[in-house]
Image (cartoon, rainbow, N blue to C red):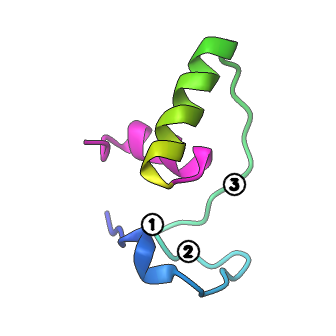
Amino acid sequence: MTTLNMSTRKGIKGQKDTPYIYDEVKAKKTIMVTPTAWNILKKKAEEEGLSISEKAERLFRGLDD
Protein backbone atom coordinates (compact mmCIF):
# COMPACT_ATOMS: atom_id res chain seq x y z
CA MET A 1 0.00 0.00 0.00
CA THR A 2 1.42 3.36 -1.03
CA THR A 3 0.55 6.55 0.81
CA LEU A 4 1.85 10.07 0.55
CA ASN A 5 1.92 12.88 3.03
CA MET A 6 -1.11 15.05 2.24
CA SER A 7 1.00 18.20 2.56
CA THR A 8 3.07 17.21 -0.49
CA ARG A 9 -0.02 17.88 -2.65
CA LYS A 10 -0.60 21.42 -1.41
CA GLY A 11 -1.46 23.67 -4.36
CA ILE A 12 -1.68 20.75 -6.79
CA LYS A 13 -5.08 20.08 -8.29
CA GLY A 14 -6.18 16.45 -8.36
CA GLN A 15 -6.96 14.78 -11.67
CA LYS A 16 -10.22 12.85 -12.04
CA ASP A 17 -9.73 9.08 -12.08
CA THR A 18 -6.03 9.44 -11.20
CA PRO A 19 -4.93 8.01 -7.86
CA TYR A 20 -2.53 10.26 -5.98
CA ILE A 21 -2.57 9.21 -2.35
CA TYR A 22 -3.40 5.51 -2.57
CA ASP A 23 -2.99 2.91 -5.32
CA GLU A 24 -6.62 3.35 -6.35
CA VAL A 25 -9.05 6.20 -6.92
CA LYS A 26 -11.75 6.96 -4.41
CA ALA A 27 -15.35 6.17 -5.35
CA LYS A 28 -18.46 7.77 -3.94
CA LYS A 29 -20.09 5.46 -1.39
CA THR A 30 -22.70 5.95 1.30
CA ILE A 31 -22.59 4.81 4.92
CA MET A 32 -25.05 5.58 7.66
CA VAL A 33 -23.83 6.71 11.07
CA THR A 34 -25.42 8.37 14.05
CA PRO A 35 -25.18 12.14 14.40
CA THR A 36 -22.85 11.61 17.36
CA ALA A 37 -20.44 9.43 15.32
CA TRP A 38 -20.52 11.95 12.45
CA ASN A 39 -19.72 14.85 14.78
CA ILE A 40 -16.82 12.94 16.35
CA LEU A 41 -15.41 12.07 12.92
CA LYS A 42 -15.86 15.65 11.72
CA LYS A 43 -14.15 17.09 14.82
CA LYS A 44 -11.18 14.71 14.56
CA ALA A 45 -10.80 15.48 10.84
CA GLU A 46 -10.83 19.23 11.51
CA GLU A 47 -8.27 18.86 14.31
CA GLU A 48 -5.92 17.03 11.94
CA GLY A 49 -6.54 19.31 8.97
CA LEU A 50 -8.11 16.48 6.96
CA SER A 51 -11.33 16.07 5.05
CA ILE A 52 -13.90 13.79 6.64
CA SER A 53 -13.39 11.42 3.71
CA GLU A 54 -9.64 11.22 4.27
CA LYS A 55 -10.06 10.78 8.04
CA ALA A 56 -12.47 7.88 7.46
CA GLU A 57 -10.10 6.37 4.86
CA ARG A 58 -7.22 6.43 7.33
CA LEU A 59 -9.35 4.95 10.12
CA PHE A 60 -10.60 2.11 7.91
CA ARG A 61 -7.10 1.35 6.57
CA GLY A 62 -5.64 1.32 10.08
CA LEU A 63 -3.37 4.29 9.31
CA ASP A 64 -4.78 6.43 12.10
CA ASP A 65 -2.45 7.20 14.98
**Cβ–Cβ under 8 Å for marks 1 and 2:** yes
Disc on res. 63: none
What amino acid is at disc 1? Tyr
For mark 2, does the 10 Å Cα neighbourhood hold few (<14), some (14 to 19), or many (20 or more) residues? few
Residue 2: x and y in percent read 33, 69
Q: Is 25 part of what is drawn in magenta?
A: no
Q: Which residue is under mark 1?
A: 22
Residue at the spot 43% in from the left edge and 49% down from the top edge = 48
**Toward the viewer: 42 or 24?**
42
Give the mark nearer the N terminus: 2 vs 3: 2
Residue extent of the magenta highlight: 50-65
Residue at the spot 60% in from the left edge and 87% down from the top edge = 12
Q: Secondary structure at mark 3?
A: loop
Residue at the spot 59% in from the left edge and 52% down from the top edge = 51
Q: Which residue is under mark 2?
A: 19
Residue 22: x and y in percent read 45, 66
What amino acid is at disc 2? Pro
For mark 1, does the 10 Å Cα neighbourhood hold few (<14), some (14 to 19), or many (20 or more) residues? few
Q: Quadrant of residue 16?
A: bottom right
Determine whether 15 is above or below 5 in the image: below
Q: Secondary structure at mark 2?
A: loop
Q: Is 57 part of what is drawn in magenta?
A: yes
Give me the C-alpha separation between circle 1 and circle 2.
6 Å
Q: Which residue is under mark 3?
A: 27
Give me the C-alpha separation between circle 2 and circle 3.
11 Å
Residue at the spot 37% in from the left edge and 44% down from the top edge = 61
For mark 3, does the 10 Å Cα neighbourhood hold few (<14), some (14 to 19), or many (20 or more) residues? few
